Image (cartoon, rainbow, N blue to C red):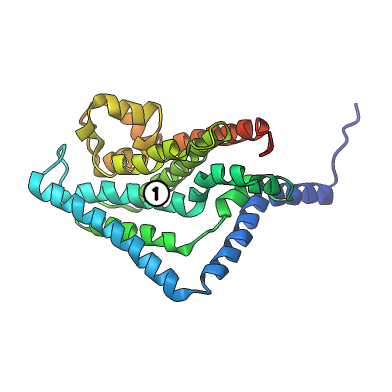
Amino acid sequence: MVEIRTPVPARRRLLARAAAGVLRPIDDYRRLAWIWVRAFAQYPASLAMMSLAVAASVLAQVGAVVIVFRHAGTLAGFTVYEGLMVFALAASAFGLADLFMGAVERLGQHIRTGSLDAMLVRPVSPLVQLAADEFSPRRLGKVVPALVVLGVAVANTDVDWTPGKALLLLVMMVSGVLICGAVWVATACLQFFVANAREAANALTYGGQALTEYPLAIYGREIVRSVTYVVPLAFVSWQPVLLVLDRPDPLGMPEALRYAGPAVAVLACAGAALLWRFGLRHYRSTGS
């Protein structure tokens, strides 16, 4: 048999096209988000006040965590700074997911008004359009205070930091953001079938954030199992903190779980993508 080889320049063109296809959604999102940023920047005073209001709400939550730990002393064996690390990881992960993907929770509104139909005929992924819709920098008011609190907590915990452990924590934080974004998309897909399911979706997104802001061991074994094996929110803050502190799980969960964050993030994103495609295939337009 004669082997037919693709010329090197043709291979390069194919690789370039493949890379462009992978990066195009990111570029489309960036362009759409920048349009909204420029629109909100036309009213800087309003944007600044809204951002400060969001930041104040996060600081109020930090105050609540500190008060609880000051009165209790420790929770599930965690000190106040260790508890703040749990809070900060959860708040920063959910804050970044809300910044980039939180707009998908308005899917039902787009279905009712017919604007989703317009998104479907544009040469841009409807999920990208939906996620970038009304992108607002004010949501950084959630992220920045959480990252500051994380820095304070890290500086005051008894952890032997090495470059490897710092890199591992960063990987776990990225995994947590991806998991939160996947949960946002997956729960939003309910609105393909029940248009008013936004509140039910919020129970898993915002409710999940409230749940993961404290050490999960205080909730009991069954809840921890459900947020580990069903909705993987335990990998947002709980398992990464156990890994960083090198502490055994108080509830006796497998130690290998603390390293599973990246794999769980990949599976969660794949599952959310499948749910989105399933919902989109069964969407029958506003008029039906």
* 123 and 20: which is toward the camera: 123
The image quarter containing residue 134 is bottom right
Q: Is residue 226 above or below residue 188?
A: above
Q: Is residue 32 above or below residue 203?
A: below
Amino acid on which disc 1 is placed: Ala
Q: Is residue 23 left or right of residue 223?
A: right
Q: Which secondary structure lies at badge 1?
A: helix
* 283 and 217: which is toward the camera: 283
| Residue 151 can be seen in this image | no
| Residue 247 can be seen in this image | yes
- Image coordinates for residue 86, horizontal then vertical, percent: 27, 46
- Image coordinates for residue 24, horizontal then vertical, percent: 67, 52
- Image coordinates for residue 234, horizontal then vertical, percent: 34, 36
At 59% from the left edge and 49% from the top edge, which residue is drawn? 130
Q: Is residue 134 left or right of residue 142?
A: right
Q: Is residue 233 above or below residue 16?
A: above
Q: Residue furthest front?
A: 287
Q: Which residue is mark 1?
A: 93
Q: Quadrant of the C terminus?
A: top right
At 52% from the left edge and 68% from the top edge, which residue is drawn? 40
